[in-house]
Image: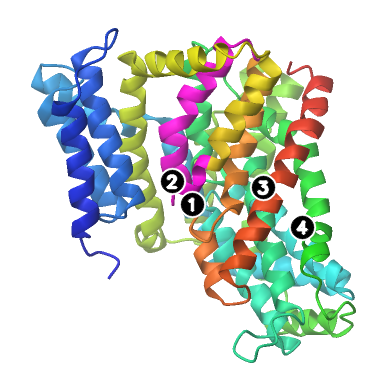
Amino acid sequence: MENQIRLISSVIAIAITLVIWFGISVPTGVSPGAWHLLALFVGTIVAIIGKAMPIGSIAIIAITLVAITGVTNPKPSIAMSDALSGFSNSLIWLIGISIIISRGLVKTGLGNRIGYYFISIFGKKTVGIVYSLAISELIIAPVTPSNTARGGGIIHPIMKSIATSFNSSPEDGTSNKIGKYLALVSYHINPITSAMFITATAPNPLIVKFIAEATNSKINITWAQWAIGGLIPGLVCIALVPFVVKFFYPPEILETPSAPVFAREKLAEMGPMKRSEKIMISVFALLLFLWANIPATIFGKAFEVDPTAVAFLGLAILLVTQVLTWEDVLKEKVAWDTITWFAALVMMASYLQKLGLIKWFSGLIETSIASFGMGWELAVFVLVTVYLYAHYFFASTTAHVTAMFGAFFAAGIALGAPPLFLAFSLIGASSIMMTLTHYATGTSPIVFGSGYTTLQEWWKMGFIMSVVNMFIWTFVGGLWWKVLGYW
């Protein structure tokens, strides 16, 4: 049962918390409050990884413990305010509201229409189908901050329908016909699109926050800056994924003349574009227009709009036009769940930063790497590689980013790495790590669970794609970021 308490995981999380709190002496240079908050933070991350309870429940417990123990401030009223401070973070609301908005893609059927439309045009060959799925995912990525909703809820059902239409199914032992290839390619596109936009997956706003904190707000990555920085390396990765997967797991069916017919039949079933879909696509365009800061670019800073305010504007329009109702908003459990656990993690990470723990830990990493006498280029390679492959031990990208990004970024800065080069390298790793395992992110168990690949095939392809994508992201991206003047 999803809502059950897992006793063993809970005991392990509690034990680790108590060991850090009581069993390890507070290191020199670290305050007792910071160390005790670290104990609560590590216990929270372990509970999330072990799925001791639903993540929202874990978040409420974490907020309660921070308030009651007074680790941030001995005064109870201030400690309570500190514990709740995460809910005032606008980036949390940006993601939560965007998740609610993305519900409209499913409710109106616009997400499916986009997918079938591109397949009707480019689907005569198998490679055309996977590129159609990739383009569809790329188009909806900026307004679907749940990569699971996008990859597992919209793209995967379309992919399964196409595989079934070619009589390729795990049950019949015919996955090799086309299903395995479609499943692997469509899955491995998901982490790439997640890396390309701040609003494409939930942990990305956390990264913006960590970068700002580590640089004393000298670097505040905007939505447009992130999208432009991720554009070229992301597109190159997307372009190569179908060919890399094809080299290792080629489909038996290469020509798919019936796929466009199938897609057109699906579009015919859907009928003409409904009013709700037209409004949805208009809101989509408006969000991108304002998130990209185009009015401010043309008319000046007076026309700048906060990204979270833009998300609220989009939701307000959908509510006024009844594309979404208040009942839809209330039923979007994922959004409210995300806001709750995000607030807890952001709060704890923020106070670890404020209390000096992150600076202390990054200093340890910096000293360890510096002892080898390597230049910043090799130091960045080591940091990014360790950060990326540590995800074998995580079942949550949010937990991984929260636990490690801030310290690794700060260590890289101290070792002399150009801040934005390092930032975008770690940004890529923070999503590309989703490729590694069948439990790496919410999308992976959905796609893996459909049965088209074996566990060995999944892990093998995941490791290969992590190497290929990270190489492209770092080297092609590095040249692109140089052209942009990011470093």
Q: From the top left corner, tell me how far across and down residue 130 is, in percent.
A: 78, 66
Give the quadrant of the C terminus: top right
The numbered mark, 4 or 2, whose residue comes first in the sequence reads 2
The answer for how far apart the CA atoms under marks 1 and 3 are is 27 Å
Residue identified by numbered label 2? 96
Front label number (4 vs 1): 4
Image quarter for residue 89?
Answer: top left
Q: From the top left corner, tell me how far across and down residue 179 is, in percent.
A: 70, 77
The numbered mark, 4 or 1, whose residue comes first in the sequence reads 1
**What residue appears at the point 33 percent right and 41 percent down from the top-left corner?**
45
Q: Is residue 157 left or right of residue 24?
A: right
Mark 4 is surrounded, within 10 Å at the Cα level, by few (under 14), some (14 to 19) or many (20 or more) other residues, namely: some
Residue identified by numbered label 3? 466
The answer for how far apart the CA atoms under marks 4 and 2 are is 24 Å
**What residue appears at the point 73 percent right and 18 percent down from the top-left corner?**
486
Tell me the amino acid under the disc marked 4. Ile
Residue 271 seen in the current view = no
- In magenta, the rendered stretch is 390-417
Tell me the amino acid under the disc marked 1. Ile
Residue identified by numbered label 4? 135
Residue identified by numbered label 1? 99
The answer for how far apart the CA atoms under marks 3 and 2 are is 29 Å
Q: Are marks 4 and 1 in contact (CB under 8 Å)?
A: no
SS of the residue under disc 1: helix
The answer for how far apart the CA atoms under marks 2 and 1 are is 5 Å
Image quarter for residue 127?
Answer: bottom right
**What residue appears at the point 81 percent right and 28 percent down from the top-left corner?**
480
SS of the residue under disc 3: helix
Q: Is residue 217 left or right of residue 93?
A: right
